[in-house]
Amino acid sequence: MPGGRLTQQDRQQIALGLADGLAYAEIARRLDRPTSTITREVMRNGGPTAYRADLAHRATERRTHRRRQAAPQGPEAPPQPHGRDSEAVREYEEALTTVLMQSGLPKMMSRVLGCLYTTDAGSLTTSELVQRLQVSPASISKAITFLESQGLVRRERDERRRERYVVDDDVWYQTMIASARSNAQLVETARQGVGVLGPDTPAAIRLENIARFVDFVGESIIRAAEQAREILYTKAETTSGGTATPSSDRG
């Protein structure tokens, strides 16, 4: 049924759809499921080229069994603020993690980033991430080091001198700018090749076209990122009832 757990027959239909080259959205439509459900199912079970219905079903049963065994021993999930549904939040975090993995981030880095994005504060400590993700501090440290190197998180100290890992609106802006500027090295190297290979030769023309394309796209990204930060960012305003609501910086 829509919204329920995937059955073995559902997984067989997913496998057939992947074999036929169908998009996740089309497979989801045929099964009357959210696209995020199909995406998450495929990505956590080998990806589109390695997905096998029987293996995916057995893996899901094993995960369910482990969760049931661990449930009495694990800490009780803390209540969600603002009246949020805890299960819905967990499902959303899984969906967001899957999308981040599809964008090229490794799984643990995607899980950490998903956690940070879905906290109202936009920051968590190592111990808080360990508790939320049920992984080792070493795994968190490795993930944070990678995310920081990519400009996706930053570190700061709170009033108790604890190190916190932070995501905010400006993180994606800075990442876009850094990415666009790193392309400048490719542009410069490509144009060096033009001189080495000789102007008007096929190889030199190819490199010059690459340089022009990357240079144009990089400049466009920088302009778009600056305009977007100026025009589109919203900030939370507190209402009289104490709840935060989005509000445009531009009025």
Image (cartoon, rainbow, N blue to C red):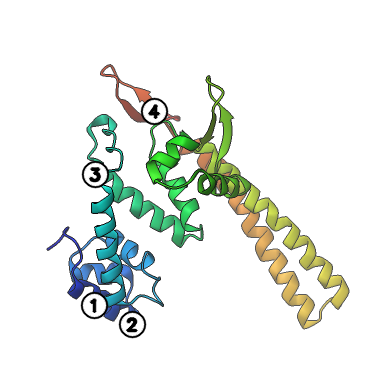
Q: Are the residues at dot 3 and dot 1 in contact (C-beta closer than 8 Å)?
A: no
Which amino acid, mark 4?
Answer: Ala
Q: Residue furthest left?
A: 1
Identify the residue position indicated by label 1 in the image. Answer: 12
Identify the residue position indicated by label 4 in the image. Answer: 236
User: Residue 232 versus residue 21: which sits nearer the camera?
Assistant: 21
Residue appearing at x 74%, y 62% in the figure: 187
Marked residue nearer the N-terminal end (3 or 1): 1
Q: From the viewer's perspective, is the residue at label 2 or at label 3 nearer? A: 3
Marked residue nearer the N-terminal end (2 or 3): 2
Residue 215 seen in the current view: yes
Please tell me whether residue 209 is drawn above or below residue 153 in the rendered image. Answer: below
Distance Cα–Cα, label 3 vs label 4: 38 Å
Identify the residue position indicated by label 3 in the image. Answer: 72
Distance Cα–Cα, label 2 vs label 3: 40 Å
Q: Position of residue 97 (x, y in %)?
A: 40, 53
Distance Cα–Cα, label 4 vs label 2: 45 Å
Marked residue nearer the N-terminal end (1 or 2): 1
Marked residue nearer the N-terminal end (4 or 2): 2
Which amino acid, mark 1?
Answer: Gln
Q: Secondary structure at mark 2?
A: helix
Position of 156 with respect to 7 (left or right) is right
Which amino acid, mark 2?
Answer: Ala
Residue appearing at x 39%, y 36% in the figure: 119
Q: Position of residue 72 (x, y in %)?
A: 24, 44
User: Residue 52 versus residue 170: which sits nearer the camera?
Assistant: 52
Q: From the viewer's perspective, is the residue at label 3 or at label 4 nearer? A: 3
Please tell me whether residue 160 is drawn above or below residue 5 in the rendered image. Answer: above
Residue appearing at x 36%, y 68% in the figure: 45
